[in-house]
Image (cartoon, rainbow, N blue to C red):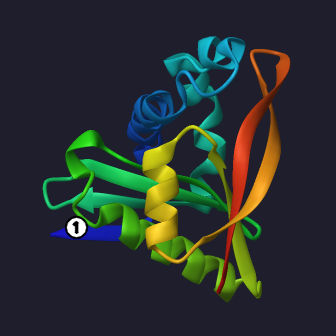
Amino acid sequence: MTTIRPAEPADMAPVADLWHEGWHDGHAGHVPDGLTAARTLAAFHERTPARVDDTTVAVADDGTLLGFAMVAGDEVEQVFVSRAARGTGVAATLLADAVARIAAAGHRSAWLAVVAGNARARRFYEKHGWSDEGDLPYEVTAGGERFVSPCRRYATDV
C-alpha cells in the first residue's frame, strides 16, 4: 500500500536523494554538461528543505520514500519516483494529486517542463492526457551559473 501525503521536514533528505538520482536518470546527456556537473547530491540537499510546503510524497507502508511531486503556482515543477517504483502507478497518482492541488488553488490549467530528450517522461505525460505545446527554453541557475535547458512545455486543463 502507498500513502500520498504532504511532505514533512523529515522527508526532505530522502526527497533530495531521490531527486538527485531521478534528475540524473532523466537529464544526463540532454542538458548542458555544466548543468549536469552542478547538480550534485549536496546541491539537491541544499535546495530541498525550502520546498517542504509545496511537496507531496508517496510512501510505502515501511516508510520508504517511493516518489514525490512539487507544485509551484500552476506548474507541476517536479515529479520523480524511485527506480523500484517506476511502472507501479505511483507517478500517475502523484501527478493526479499535483493537478488537484493546482485546481484547488484556483487555476484552470497546469503546465510542466520536460527535457526534450527525456522520451520516457514525455510518453508518460502524453499517456496521461497532457499536450505538448512546443519548445520551452527553460532557464535555471545552478552552481552560480545560468543555463538554458532544451525543454518542451506540456499542459492540461484541471
Residue 7 shows in this picture:
no
Quadrant position of residue 151: top right
Looking at the image, is 137 positioned above or below residue 131? above
Residue under the image location 47 percent in, 37 percent down: 19
Quarter of the rendering containing residue 117: top right
Q: Which residue is the site of mark 1?
A: 2
Q: Is residue 154 above or below residue 38?
A: below
| Residue shown at 44% from the left, 70% from the top | 127
Mark 1 lies on a secondary structure that is strand
All told, the count of numbered labels is 1
* Kind of residue at disc 1: Thr
Q: Give the image location of residue 12, x and y in percent.
A: 47, 42
Q: Residue 27: where, in percent of width, then height?
A: 55, 31
Residue 79 higher or lower than 23, as above or below: below
Q: Tell me the quarter of the picture where residue 70 sits.
A: bottom right
Tell me: 25 left or right of 27. Answer: left
- Residue 4, position in %: x, y? 35, 70
* Quarter of the figure that contains the N terminus: bottom left
User: Which quadrant would the C terminus be assigned to in this image?
Assistant: bottom right
Nearer-the-camera pick, 93 or 152 = 152
Residue in the picture at 70% in, 19% down: 32
